[in-house]
């Protein structure tokens, strides 16, 4: 699964890890995150993320 980086703060969402602080289990693809999910570091919305090249 592809990793995504926050364009504002550089946080990398790694599907292999998920986002435990927001109850997102490991194995959750970025596309499958809830629409209201935000960056745990800076609060940016999903549209502020880009795929890691």
Image (cartoon, rainbow, N blue to C red):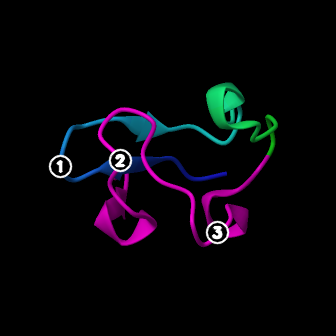
Q: Secondary structure at mark 1?
A: loop
Which residue is depicted at the point 34% across and 35% down?
A: 11
Which residue is depicted at the point 36% across and 32% down?
A: 41
* Residue 26 colored in magenta in the image: no
Badge 2 is on which residue?
43
Q: Earlier in the sequence, mark 3 or mark 1?
A: 1
Which residue is depicted at the point 31% across and 49% down?
A: 6
User: How far apart, in angstroms, are the residues tagged by discs 1 and 2?
Assistant: 9 Å
Considering only vertical position in the picture, is 26 above or below 45?
A: above
State the mark number for residue 8: 1
State the mark number for residue 23: none
Residue 5 in the image, given as x and y percentages of width and height: 35, 47
- Looking at the picture, tell me which residue is in the foreground, 8 or 21: 21
Q: Which residues are magenta?
A: 28-53
Would you say 49 lies left or right of 10 here?
right
Would you say 26 lies left or right of 31 here?
right
Q: Secondary structure at mark 3?
A: helix
Assign the magenta stretch its main secondary structure.
loop
User: How far apart, in angstroms, are the residues tagged by discs 3 and 2?
Assistant: 17 Å
Which residue is depicted at the point 70% across and 27% down?
A: 20
Would you say 11 lies left or right of 23 here?
left
Considering only vertical position in the picture, is 52 above or below 35?
A: above
Residue 38 in the image, given as x and y percentages of width and height: 47, 53
Badge 3 is on which residue?
31
Would you say 26 lies left or right of 29 here?
right
* Cβ–Cβ under 8 Å for marks 3 and 1: no
Q: How many marks?
A: 3
Q: Secondary structure at mark 2?
A: loop
């Amino acid at each position: 699964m592809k990793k995504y980086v926050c364009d504002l703060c550089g946080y990398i969402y790694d599907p292999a890890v998920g986002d435990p602080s927001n109850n997102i289990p490991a194995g959750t693809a970025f596309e499958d995150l809830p629409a209201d999910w935000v960056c745990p570091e800076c609060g940016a919305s999903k549209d502020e993320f880009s795929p890691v090249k």
